[in-house]
Amino acid sequence: MSRTLQQLRDLIDATDKELLALLNRRAGFAAEVGEIKKLDGSPVYRPEREAQVISGLQQANAGPIKNASVAHIWREIMSACRSLEAPQRVAYLGPAGTFSELAALQFFGTSIEHIPCASFDEVFHATTSGSADFGVVPVENNTEGVVTRTLDLFLNSPLHIIGETSFLVRHHLLRLSNSLDNIEVVLAHPQALAQCQGWLSQHLPNTERRAVSSNAEGARLAASNPNWAGIASERAGAEFGLHVVAHAIQDDAFNRTRFAVVCLPQTQPMPAASGKDCISLIVSVPNKPGAVHDLLIPLKKHGVSMTRFESRPARSGQWEYFFYIDLVGHPSTPHVAAALHELQGLCAFYKLLGSYAVSD
């Protein structure tokens, strides 16, 4: 005999109470772990451990809950438990509603202390000075390429990368009135304006495009003038009371941005190997024929794959460059360690930015 609606609701209510009891039990165990960590000086946050927990649960998942939902649910559970030990202070490009804020919430969960910053430079400064425990910054977009300011800041910063996260970015046109008529100015971060230039040229060809510090700042400004519009997330629209006049106006339907999570080494040491890791480096080589080619020899010799290779001017006036490289693996693995040792011997400048679990 099938259950009635009321019977099903009663079962759900009872199950919710069981879940709550189990979650509080888990939180109690987490609090005990926190006390042990205080005694031995271990870091509160272990990104590789959390990645392993989620991966294990996904492998054990028999449905009907999807694995993506499992990851989201347990990230929030671990965030809530982590906050009992010490809430993480996380800096990101603000104000509220930016994609950087969404990246921070996706990586850490919502139980964090928010530190919105006015620029990427400020994110690095807040994290370096100790005002924030962690910083979250965009590093590359699949259509517009690398975020050059972030790469430049890495060069002289003591911060290292301990994690990454990425997601599909949906840019929406936001405005006080629900109409495309009489828009005089469109405000957004330069990257967003570039990612939406096709749509803007077709639908608002005569409208001024004005670059601002962040998409959420563009939304905030659009809320102050009925003839202005911003390009930002739905979250930013809700934050500033704006209509979504046009949905998903980015030129690439699969527009994806990757973010790096950074901190001081004393705040969080390099995560242990998770089995699915990335190494990020900055190097430069002597200005001689074949020097860049020689960088590839240790990688091929020891079977290490390279997934990213970007160049930035060294600003020395001598046409020299720094190279930003991502490799597959972890420095604790013998063949990777051997490749890095030989690579370092070829470089005039060598900086290990970090090794961390790859995001899905």
Image (cartoon, rainbow, N blue to C red):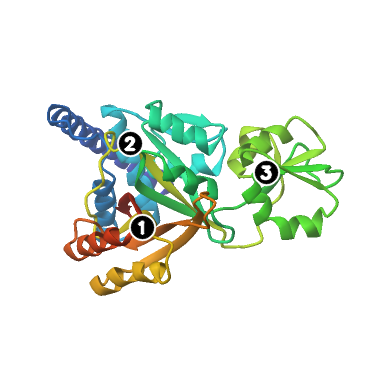
**Between discs 2 and 3, the one toward the N terminus:** 3
Q: Mark 2 points at which residue?
A: 264
Q: Nearer the viewer, residue 79 or 273?
A: 273
Q: Which mark is residue 188?
A: 3
Residue 192 at least partly seen? yes
Q: Name the residue under label 1.
A: 67
**Mark 2 Cα-neighbour bin, 10 Å: few <14, some 14–19, many ≥20:** many
Quadrant of res 94: top right
**Mark 1 Cα-neighbour bin, 10 Å: few <14, some 14–19, many ≥20:** some
Q: Nearer the viewer, residue 75 or 292?
A: 292
**Mark 3 Cα-neighbour bin, 10 Å: few <14, some 14–19, many ≥20:** many
Residues at circles 3 and 1 in contact by the CB criterion of under 8 Å: no
**Between discs 3 and 1, the one toward the N terminus:** 1
Residue 332 pos. (x, y %): 19, 56
Residue 2 at least partly seen? no
Secondary structure beneath disc 2?
loop
Residues at circles 1 and 2 in contact by the CB criterion of under 8 Å: no
Secondary structure beneath disc 1?
helix
| In this view, the mark in front (1 or 2) | 2
Q: Is residue 80 above or below residue 252?
A: above
Secondary structure beneath disc 3?
strand
Which image quarter holds the C terminus?
bottom left
Q: In this view, does 274 lie to the left or right of 184?
A: left
Residues at circles 2 and 3 in contact by the CB criterion of under 8 Å: no
Amino acid at pointer 2? Leu
Q: In this view, does 27 lie above or below 172?
A: above
Q: In this view, does 77 lie above or below 180?
A: above
Residue 15 pos. (x, y %): 30, 42
The residue located at (54%, 44%) in the rendering is 99
